[in-house]
Amino acid sequence: MEIDYKNIKVIGFDADDTLWVNETYFRDAETKFGQLLSEYETPNKLEQELFKKEIENLELYGYGVKAFTLSMVEAALELSNYNVKPKTIEAVLNIGKTMLNEPVELLDGVEEVLKTLSKKYKLILATKGDLLDQERKLEKSGLTKYFHHIEVLSEKKEENYSKLLNHLDIKPSEFLMIGNSLKSDVLPLVNLKAKAIHVPFHTTWAHEQVTENETNGKQYQTINSLTDLLNILG
């Protein structure tokens, strides 16, 4: 069934792994963490326990590099039975600092797409994570000029999007969300009767993965690249 976008006036974009590379840095950091703690557990066990710690801490720390770094420190302490050396903890903290200083690598065609669509639609950025880190990445990206509004959300659930749309006086029927996560960028919007387009990234954090049952009967479009938007909406 073809989806009709003719009523769309506002387009929301996710940031991490939609506009620029992000998850790749987390996977690299997990590998480094595994190497640092290799005397205590196998790489697979370390990865599993770190993920459990991240999920356990979500309510307290939220998302982003700082939350991830704190979870790495806690996991290192617990997995080593509190025998981990201070130098190792310092190395873990340096993993986080390195992540925060990574360059912003735009995905293919991002600026062309934003430049073109901003002439016809009002664009907003709706991302989640650490406010300071997201502001830093946006500044590095050079994309700020294309967005009418920028919102860093603590979560991306139906209630969060509903508050955002109400605050900006946007009708769900006139809103389209673009993002790489079915869980965070697509399904909540479809449930609110807005439109959503899924642009998969090659790596997806386990917490963002969904089951086939969760997507059954949901109307949304999947495209291979952001540049495909120009054929659909341009």
Image: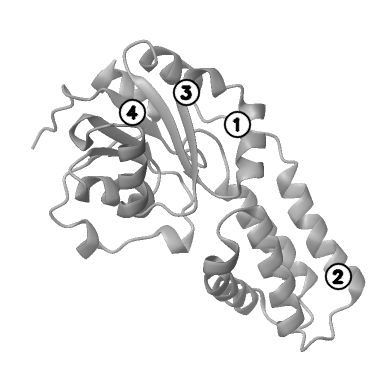
* Residue 227 figure quarter: top left
Disc 4 versus disc 1: distance between alpha carbons? 17 Å
Q: Is residue 143 above or below residue 75?
A: above
User: What element does badge 4 sit on?
Assistant: strand
The C terminus lies in quadrant: top left
> Quadrant of the rendered structure where residue 226 is?
top left
Q: Considering depth in this image, is 216 or 56 the residue closer to the camera?
A: 56
Q: Name the residue type under label 3.
A: Phe
Q: CA distance from mark 4 to mark 2?
A: 44 Å
Q: Earlier in the sequence, mark 1 or mark 2?
A: 2
Disc on the earlier residue, 4 or 1: 4
Locate residue 135: give its quadrant: top right
The amino acid type, in three-letter code, at marker 4 is Ile
The residue labelled by disc 4 is: 11
- The residue where tag 3 is placed is 147
Image coordinates of residue 166 in percent, x first then y, are 30, 39
Residue with the mark numbered 1 = 138
Q: What kind of residue is marked 2?
A: Thr
Q: Where in the figure is residue 36, as x and y percent of width and height?
A: 79, 69
Residue that mark 2 sits on? 88
- 79 or 203, which lies in front? 79
Q: Are marks 4 and 2 in contact (CB under 8 Å)?
A: no
Circle 1 — which element? helix
Q: Amino acid under label 1?
A: Leu
The answer for how far apart the CA atoms under marks 1 and 2 are is 31 Å
